[in-house]
């Protein structure tokens, strides 16, 4: 199979006009740090034909994007055929341009009606998600070979139910674990629904992983804590979907064979590493001197190699479904691109099976709580005029892909 070179976006971050999901309500509650609105964002909903030309400019052969659940099912059980047709038109255009779609079905946002029912914490969430997936897959299956059921399920649990920064704003370890457990079964339902309609499709999740290190290797508590967080955050979810054993904190080691073998490949989202410390006042991240991006995240490209080598033992092909850096001045991103691809090449040379790389992101967009303040795009966006301009890193990525990328 040809290596997939692409970029990634998410519907709520680029489309504009998503008035029927939980994040729109979160904005209306004043939760966005900058006060920005996700409407019109990049107006990708209307401007996708010209944005697909940006993909061609990059010499990419793939594009990862998501459909917006709340557009298609604004009200419970009522599916909008016009919205389904809109996404079908996007897929048809990608096919015409010989760009392979990697389609995400759930990227953080849920319809308001579902949020009012308890969202991902509702025991019936897998059933609601399955009903949605069964409705859209028949319309899209002729165009899609690679599916992502859920983007970063553990992040949904951690940010919305443990730290409480994202909707619904809960701070509870047990409720976080319950949500992630529900998302395991929601993925299973979606996986089965896709396979029934399109048996040859490859289906996965996009799983965020980051390297956790103890703030001090001399501190046994920090060593234990870093190891525990690493297992809970990085491995428990995907290992469960490979062997069916529901690991802590999402279970107690019990086995559910219906979860087994529901990952055809591993979708990896990688950005940074974290040094952790557990003290009397609880957990904290320890920021050590390092090159940092606009988000304050350490720029650590080698980390993707460290994770890829560890994933090798799981025996699955890997697609890097996101990797990038927040850098409005493009001072870090060019070297980051070179370095990240160097370490991916090193992992491939050591036998890790990697099928593609999707850079986050194609263009600047609405970065959740941070509004438009964090710029991840290869293309700079003027949100007043909707003009797109290629950054130096866009030209570099284009050149790298022309020369086989590595």
Image: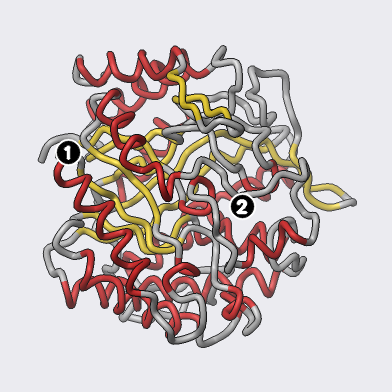
User: Could you tell whether 155 is left or right of 373 in the image?
Assistant: left
Q: What is the quadrant of the C terminus in the image?
A: top left
Residue name at image x 22 percent, y 64 percent: 140
Q: Residue furthest front?
A: 385
Q: Badge 2 local density, few (<14 within 10 Å), some, or many (20+)?
A: some
| SS at circle 2 | helix
Distance Cα–Cα, label 2 vs label 1 = 43 Å
Which residue is more in the foreground, 159 or 181?
Answer: 159
Residue name at image x 69 percent, y 29 percent: 296
Q: Is residue 198 above or below residue 98?
A: below
Question: Does any portion of residue 178 appear in the rendered image?
Answer: no
**In terms of image quadrants, where is residue 326?**
top right
Percent x, y of residue 141: 18, 65
Percent x, y of residue 287: 74, 29
Which residue is more in the foreground, 18 or 207?
Answer: 18
Residue name at image x 46 percent, y 17 percent: 391
Q: Which mark is residue 229?
A: 2
Question: Does any portion of residue 114 appear in the rendered image?
Answer: yes
User: Could you tell whether 225 is left or right of 387 in the image?
Assistant: right
Which residue is more in the foreground, 264 or 379?
Answer: 379
Q: Badge 1 local density, few (<14 within 10 Å), some, or many (20+)?
A: some
Q: Which mark is residue 97?
A: 1
Q: What is the quadrant of the N terminus in the image?
A: top left
Q: Nearer the viewer, mark 2 or mark 1?
A: 1
Circles 2, 1 touching at the beta carbon (< 8 Å): no
Residue name at image x 44 percent, y 52 percent: 207
Percent x, y of residue 33: 78, 44
Of marks 2 and 1, which one's residue comes earlier in the chain? 1
């Amino acid at each position: 199979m040809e290596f997939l070179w692409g970029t990634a976006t998410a519907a709520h971050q680029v489309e504009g006009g998503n008035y029927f999901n939980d994040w729109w309500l979160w904005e209306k509650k004043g939760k966005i740090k900058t006060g920005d609105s996700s409407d019109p964002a990049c107006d990708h909903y209307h401007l996708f034909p010209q944005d697909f030309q940006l993909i061609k400019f990059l010499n990419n052969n793939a594009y990862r994007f998501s459909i917006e659940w709340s557009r298609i099912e604004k009200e419970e059980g009522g599916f909008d055929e016009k919205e389904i047709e809109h996404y079908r038109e996007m897929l048809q255009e990608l096919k015409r341009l010989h760009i392979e779609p990697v389609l995400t079905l759930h990227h953080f946002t849920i319809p308001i009606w579902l949020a009012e029912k308890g969202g991902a914490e509702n025991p019936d969430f897998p059933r609601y998600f399955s009903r949605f997936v069964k409705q859209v897959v028949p319309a899209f299956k002729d165009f899609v070979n690679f599916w992502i059921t859920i983007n970063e399920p553990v992040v949904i649990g951690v940010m919305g139910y443990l730290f409480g920064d994202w909707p619904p704003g809960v701070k509870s370890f047990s409720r976080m674990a319950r949500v992630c457990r529900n998302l395991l079964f929601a993925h299973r339902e979606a996986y089965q629904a896709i396979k029934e309609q399109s048996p040859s499709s490859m289906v996965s999740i996009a799983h965020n992983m980051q390297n956790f290190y103890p703030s001090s290797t001399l501190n046994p508590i920090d060593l234990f804590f870093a190891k525990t967080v690493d297992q809970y955050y990085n491995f428990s979810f995907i290992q469960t979907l490979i062997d069916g054993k529901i690991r802590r904190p999402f279970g107690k080691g019990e086995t559910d064979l219906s979860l087994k073998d529901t990952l055809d490949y591993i979708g990896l989202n990688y950005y940074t590493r974290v040094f952790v410390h557990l003290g009397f006042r609880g957990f904290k991240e320890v920021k050590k001197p390092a090159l940092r991006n606009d988000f304050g995240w350490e720029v650590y490209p080698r980390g993707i190699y460290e994770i890829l080598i560890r994933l090798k033992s799981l025996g699955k092909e890997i697609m890097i479904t996101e990797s990038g850096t927040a850098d409005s001045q493009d001072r870090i991103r060019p070297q980051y691109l070179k370095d990240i691809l160097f370490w991916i090449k090193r992992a491939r040379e050591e036998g890790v099976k990697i099928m593609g790389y999707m850079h986050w992101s194609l263009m600047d967009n609405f970065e959740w709580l941070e509004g438009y303040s964090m710029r991840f795009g290869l293309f700079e966006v003027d949100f007043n005029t909707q003009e797109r301009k290629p950054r130096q890193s866009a030209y570099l990525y284009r050149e790298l892909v022309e020369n086989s990328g590595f």
